Image (cartoon, rainbow, N blue to C red):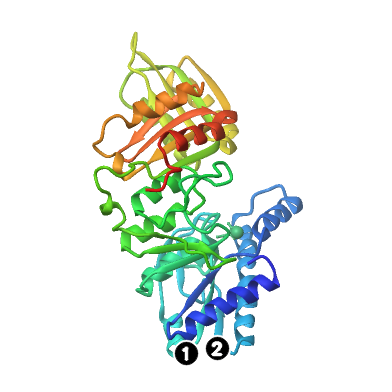
Amino acid sequence: MGDAEKIRNVARRIADVRKSGTSVVAVVSAMGDTTDELIELAHSVSKQSHPRELDLLLSTGELVSCTLLTMALADLGQEAVGLTGSQAGIHTDTSYGRARIDRVDTSRMQKEMEEGRIVVVAGFQGITEDEDITTLGRGGSDTTAVALAVALEADRCEIYTDVDGIYTADPKIVPEARKLDEIGYDEMLELAYYGFKRHPRSIELGRLYNVPIYVASSFNQTPGTLIHGNADKKIMENRIKVTGIACTTNVAKITVRSVPDRPGVAAALFEPLAQSGISVDTIVQNTSQDRTTDISFTVSGTDLKAALAKVEELTKEIGAGGLASEANLAAVSVVGSGMQNTPGYASRMFRMLADGNVNIDMITTSEIRISCIIKEDQAEEAVRLLHRGFQLDQPE
Ligand code: ASP
Ligand code: MG
């Protein structure tokens, strides 16, 4: 919802659904770049971190769109009521900036719906037991929406956004990327973790409670993508088995050299990192030679400085030999449930990258994903190579 016209447009679409006899709870996110602007404003006022106040500040972005949408609905003759996250009964833990939803008390929303109103809820926020406002992390309105669908036992959750569905790769990188009609939760989760623009927590919730999530455009009526549990099961043996190619940029790698090979060392390294809120992704440990080993792992480029400072201390504590780091890396991932138990996908991926002269730095796999860490400036080309190589441009 970028401007007044777009808000009126969203209101019309919601009103149409309501007129068809469906009860609607609409969750809104902030307009345009509001959240970024609020963060910038906070930083320009104070260099310190103020987690509680920052969340209270950021929650206002969603209040703006919530109230405006409710007014636009009233203009269309629809009875509607705007609710903050806390009025909607969304209770979270106390982790400011990345709060998790503990429970949703639906009574207020139910009452409003019973009285025939459309309920418009400010996304991305909740309230703690001590009645402090929290936010759920960037992109968190998706999670609010799915959580409310779960709590209200809705038939499905529809997300209208600036992309018109889930594609086989980012269409900005791969113009031939195809929109998928449907995708399974597991595949969608891997794609979301590894670079697709969806909040992974919302997909986790959908999967856990089996709520189908439909992702479509907020600007036009073209059909979107349905994320649901049965999509995985439809895979026949000879279908194209790769579903999508994901890419994460701004990846950094840290290598701790000559780490003593004894129990407890990995824990001594990664526990303090986790406690500092630094999330570690790919981890590779070599087999040891002369009772020492090298451990490499990746973090987000944004966390590199903080991670290095921490690891430097730890290197001394655990008696490791040294430390190296590299920024400007990327992870390209091939994802598909159909790859399970089918050999040859990894080697095909490596061959395609080799033929494109892309050097692979690290490799990790899950049952339905293969990821390679490569240089960031080769990432887009790698995505195109893999998309073409696995024939994702061709209709099934
Ligand atoms: N406004 C919040 C953000 O920009 C939440 C959202 O957009 O879903 O991260
Ligand atoms: Mg936003």
352 or 327, nearer to the observer: 352
For disc 1, the marked residue is: 116
Residue 367 location, quadrant: top left
For disc 2, the marked residue is: 79
Quarter of the N terminus within the rendering: bottom right
194 or 316, nearer to the observer: 194
Q: Position of residue 282 (x, y in %)?
A: 42, 32
Q: Position of residue 171 (x, y in %)?
A: 55, 47
Q: Position of residue 261 (x, y in %)?
A: 34, 18
Q: Is residue 179 left or right of residue 228?
A: right
Residue furthest to the front in view is 395
**Could you tell me which residue is drawn at 49 percent across and 47 percent down?**
196
Residue furthest to the top in view is 290
Asked if 50 appears above or below 393 in the picture, the reply is below
Secondary element at tag 1: loop
- Measure how far apart labels 2 and 1 are at the Cα level: 7 Å
Q: Position of residue 95 (x, y in %)?
A: 50, 55
Q: Name the amino acid type tagged 1.
A: Gly
Q: What is the total number of numbered labels drawn onto the structure image?
A: 2
48 or 143, nearer to the observer: 143
**Could you tell me which residue is drawn at 63 percent across and 71 percent down?**
65
Asked if 102 appears above or below 15 in the picture, the reply is above
Q: Which mark is residue 230?
A: none
Local crowd at mark 2 within 10 Å, few (<14), some, or many (≥20)? some
Residue 22 location, quadrant: bottom left
Q: Whereabouts is ligand 2, in terms of quadrant?
A: bottom right
